[in-house]
Image (cartoon, rainbow, N blue to C red):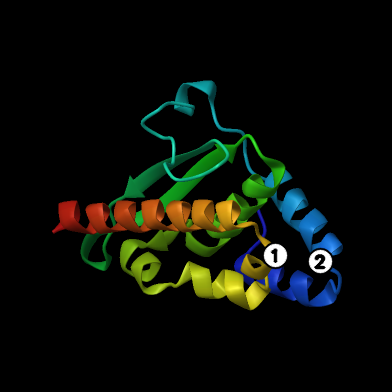
């Protein structure tokens, strides 16, 4: 999976929205497959027009707080790409860092949100809220 800095760099090289759109789809293809057993109602993200599943894996890390890793899937190619960008931003990070990172600002900086339909923007917000809730819950249970 691409790192967020690499994604930013690649976006600056792509001038046309169509090229960026294809790149986002390509990022989605890099997601590891989500097992069929994880395609459950419990893992489904509410508020997305497409079907989106998100699984959060939490590793305790002593005084530094828990580290969260994510796996996920969607039935829409562009949404899989958005998930890949969110994972590049959040996966493998401490819960406190996740809570301190404004994903919507990152997507704005990439110029993505202005080119998403309102439904996709709402779905993106729902995915971010779910990740943030999981980070808050991990911190609370570690305390």
The label shown at residue 22 is none
The quadrant holding residue 102 is bottom left
Task: Kindly report the distance in space between the C-alpha atoms of the residues bearing marks 1 and 2.
Answer: 8 Å
Residue furthest to the top: 37
**Residue lying at 38% horizontally and 51% vertically, measured from the top left:** 130
Task: From the viewer's side, name the closer residue of 67 and 130.
Answer: 130
How many circles with numbers are drawn on the protein? 2
Residue furthest to the front: 118
**Residue lying at 66% horizontally and 73% vertically, measured from the top left:** 110
Q: What residue sits right under mark 2 in the picture?
A: 17
Horizontal arrangement in the rendering, residue 77 relative to residue 56 (left or right): right
Task: Label 1: state its secondary structure.
Answer: helix
| First-in-chain label (1 vs 2) | 2
In the rendered view of the protein, which quadrant contains the C terminus?
Answer: bottom left
In x, y percent, where is residue 96? 31, 68
Residue furthest to the left: 143
Task: Label 2: state its secondary structure.
Answer: helix
Q: What residue sits right under mark 1 in the picture?
A: 115
Q: Badges 1 and 2: C-beta atoms under 8 Å apart?
A: yes
Are there few (<14), some (14-19), or many (20+) residues within 10 Å of tag 2?
few
Horizontal arrangement in the rendering, residue 105 relative to residue 66 (left or right): right
Image vertical order of residue 71 relative to residue 22, above or below:
above
In x, y percent, where is residue 50? 58, 39
């Amino acid at each position: 999976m691409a790192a967020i800095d690499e994604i930013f760099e690649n976006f600056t090289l792509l001038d046309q929205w169509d090229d960026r759109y294809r790149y986002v789809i390509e990022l989605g293809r890099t997601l590891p497959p989500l097992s069929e057993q994880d395609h459950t109602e419990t893992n489904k993200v509410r508020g997305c027009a497409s079907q989106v599943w998100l699984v959060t894996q939490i590793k305790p890390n002593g005084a530094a707080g828990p580290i969260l890793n994510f796996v996920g899937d969607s039935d829409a190619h562009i949404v899989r790409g958005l998930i890949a960008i969110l994972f590049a931003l959040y996966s493998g990070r401490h819960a406190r860092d996740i809570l301190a990172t404004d994903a919507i600002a990152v997507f704005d900086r990439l110029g993505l949100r202005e080119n998403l339909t309102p439904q996709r923007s709402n779905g993106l917000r729902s995915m971010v809220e779910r990740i943030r809730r999981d980070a808050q819950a991990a911190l609370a249970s570690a305390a």
